[in-house]
Image (cartoon, rainbow, N blue to C red):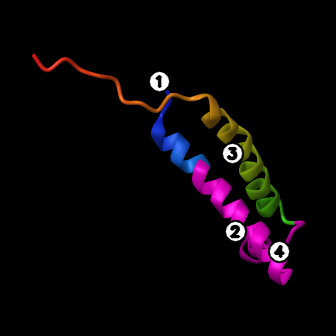
Amino acid sequence: MRSRTWDYICLSLVILGAINWGLIGLFRFDLIAVLFGGMESILSRIIYTLIALAGLYCLTFYGRDYREPVHDRG
């Protein structure tokens, strides 16, 4: 069983990436670069890489069955 905490962390990173791309597209403003020292800083590159890996991990959400297991009440 996969950890839902890990799922939420990855989903949060993907949302951050989506917001960042929206800001880049609308205003030419790169939030990640501003917060972490520019596009060339190692910290920004790590964040971009984590967002990309989280996006790839979130692809696994498509094949999951999220129904809760049924427990006998008897």
Front residue of 45/64: it is 64
Report which residue position mark 2 lands on: 19
- How far separated are the C-alphas under marks 2 and 4? 9 Å
Front residue of 28/49: it is 28
Q: Residue at x 48, y 34 (%)?
A: 3
Marks 2/1 in contact by CB < 8 Å: the verdict is no
- Label 3's element? helix
Q: Which residues are magenta?
A: 11-40
In the picture, the quarter occupied by the C terminus is top left
The amino acid sitting under disc 4 is Ile
Image disc number at residue 24? 4
Q: Is residue 74 left or right of residue 14?
A: left
- How far separated are the C-alphas under marks 4 and 3? 20 Å
Seen in the picture, residue 59 relative to 63 is either above or below; the reply is below
The amino acid sitting under disc 3 is Ala
Marks 1/4 in contact by CB < 8 Å: the verdict is no
- Label 4's element? helix
Report which residue position mark 1 lands on: 1
Q: Is residue 45 left or right of residue 19?
A: right
Q: Is disc 1 surrounded by few (<14), some (14 to 19) or many (20+) residues within 10 Å?
A: few
Q: Is disc 3 surrounded by few (<14), some (14 to 19) or many (20+) residues within 10 Å?
A: many
Report which residue position mark 3 lands on: 54
Q: Residue at x 74, y 75 (%)?
A: 31
- How far separated are the C-alphas under marks 2 and 1? 30 Å
Q: Is disc 4 surrounded by few (<14), some (14 to 19) or many (20+) residues within 10 Å?
A: few
